[in-house]
Amino acid sequence: MDLNTLIVGVYFLFLIAIGWMFRKFTSTTSDYFRGGGNMLWWMVGATAFMTQFSAWTFTGAAGKAYNDGFAVAIIFIANAFGYLMNYLYFAPKFRQLRVVTVIEAIRMRFGSKNEQVFTWASMPTSMVSAGIWLNGLAIIASGIFGFDMNTTIILTGLVVLVMSVTGGSWAVIASDFMQMVIIMAVTVTCAVVAIIQGGGVGEIINNFPLEDGATFLAGNDLNYTSIFGIWAVFIFIKQFSITNNMLNSYRYLAAKDSKNAKKAALLACILMTMGPLIWFMPSWFVAGQGIDLATIYPEMGKKAADYSYLYFVEQYMPAGMVGLLISGMFAATMSSMDSGLNRNSGIFVKNFYEPVLRKFEASENELVFVSKITSTVCGALIILVALYINSLKGMSLFDAMMNVGAFIGFPMTIPAFLGFFIRKSPDWAGWGTLVVGGLVSYFVGIHVNAETISNLFNLDTLTHREWSDLKVAVGLISHIVLTGGFFLMSTLFYTKLSDAREKDVDKFFNNLATPLVSEGVAQQKLDNSQRKMLGTLIGVAGLAIMTMFFLNNPMWGRAIFILCGGIVLGVGVVLVMAVDGKVNDDNEKSATNS
């Protein structure tokens, strides 16, 4: 058996084992969808970070780095800014919503009609995003193993599905932390090798191929640098909105209290700040070497640049590192696909099946069973989306993700963000804003083209990249002005709500203002369970990586596995040592949270 295949196979078994081990933590829907709201900050911070990080980072984003230098890092720096705002204000507030799914918060704020509208509007969005992430993973896996892309998508999707369905949010979030440690260790070593091979960071930047007048910061294929500036500004606004609204508050619903949610956001911010310089150094190095990926991977067409990171690992890293990297890719994509599996399943079960189909008469056992069925169906749909995206050979994964975010994801965040601050808005402002947002997306996406913008502002013909960036910016500007303007204008028509609705809205804002504190022996026991189980798993993973020292590599290659494994093992040891010996660890679960 091929070495890389063996490594990935062992890792698959390890992931499935995590789902099986953490199944005992799941007895209710609250456990299944958000870990019962009992998780420590380092687990929640890891999953918050990993939901913005997937195999797309090493395919679509790496391809953008190969073509345009530092420009792609703007997206991740904007994510870091969003997490900083989480830390400074939003993360504790999100946890204080005291809900199992984010749509429950929408119901409190905007009423039951909006609960159904947002339920059915949000699920397709996350499925499309998850499909893009799965497609990015399949690009890497098929390139290494030589499998057909469609076969790879189906197989990798099924592995992710099995783990998510078996263990629910406990398994997913626990694995997120372990995977975060592994992926950071692997990418740090790749960046170090790229820097050494490239003669230093300065040389890599100096050697990056640039057209006349282009800069490493803005990249190539630009006649108007101002377009890049406009794109960057509105990417910051978009990422801030995406990371700081009720629909994406699910990242922090699993935290055991307000303080842990705040710490989790800080961890995600630090990791996202460090990430870009680490993740994209290999792609910048490959571009600087003058390597023509389109010639090496002709079957990928315009997506050939998406193989830049894979090419680096295959050509410059020691034997076995490719398999370890693929394992990390599965790690990253699994956490991102959770938003299309566990989250969608939770929304369907708690916000449609239970209140509409079962009229709140279903038992917890029934709801957990239906949750697993729903996760399976969502997984199958995500696989189908990924297969369709793979058929679109002319669209890069980077452009696909940018367009989904600007035209589908962003308009949905507007009422979920503004409703967080503006109390006196009518209930119809929620679904009405989505309708306006859909119309704006349709008009800009279908009827506004490069020629329209060139004629309007008297510009020369726009390059492909300029129009790709500008289309995203135009979509975001349109939604801020028109979609956001509609929500603000709706406040002019506010009238007093019914007594029941006023009670719900009061509860919503009172929850936001009331800190959540978790304490007691039962919670301490569960904290110890998390530290001990996850610390042991991570320690085992670290030792397994260190045994790769014995592979047939030069000494520097063997040292890389010692470095990677040592980092992972060290984190595991720290967690186990953090177990409080004064508390009897019997896996009893806390009932102090809500």
Image (tube, rainbow, N blue to C red):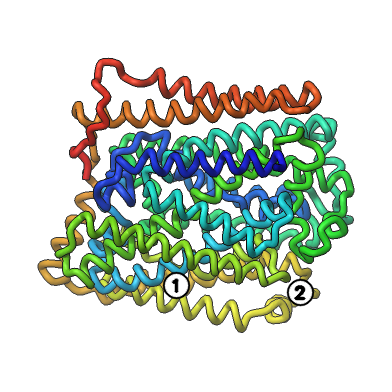
* Badge 1 amino acid: Thr
- On the image, the x and y values in percent for residue 177 come to 47, 37
Q: Mark 1 points at which residue?
A: 483
Q: Which amino acid does label 2 sit on?
A: Leu
Secondary structure category for the residue under label 1: helix
Total of numbered circles in the picture?
2
Where is residue 457 drawn, in percent x and y? 70, 76
**Where residue 484 appears, x then y in whole percent?**
43, 69
| Image quarter in which the C terminus is found | top left
Q: Residues within 10 Å of mark 2 (few under 14, many from 20)?
A: few
Instruction: Give the side of residue 171 with respect to residue 234, left or right.
Output: left
Q: Seen in the image, is 449 located left or right of residue 133?
A: right
Q: Quadrant of residue 503?
A: bottom left
Residue 459: image tag: 2
- Distance between mark 2 and mark 1 Cα atoms: 27 Å
Q: Which of marks 2 and 1 is nearer the N terminus?
A: 2
Pick the residue in front: 378 or 181.
378
Q: Which residue lies furthest to the top in this view?
A: 582
Residue farthest to the left? 499
When asked about the image quadrant of residue 543, the answer is: top right
Mark 2 residue element: loop
Q: Is residue 84 visible?
A: no
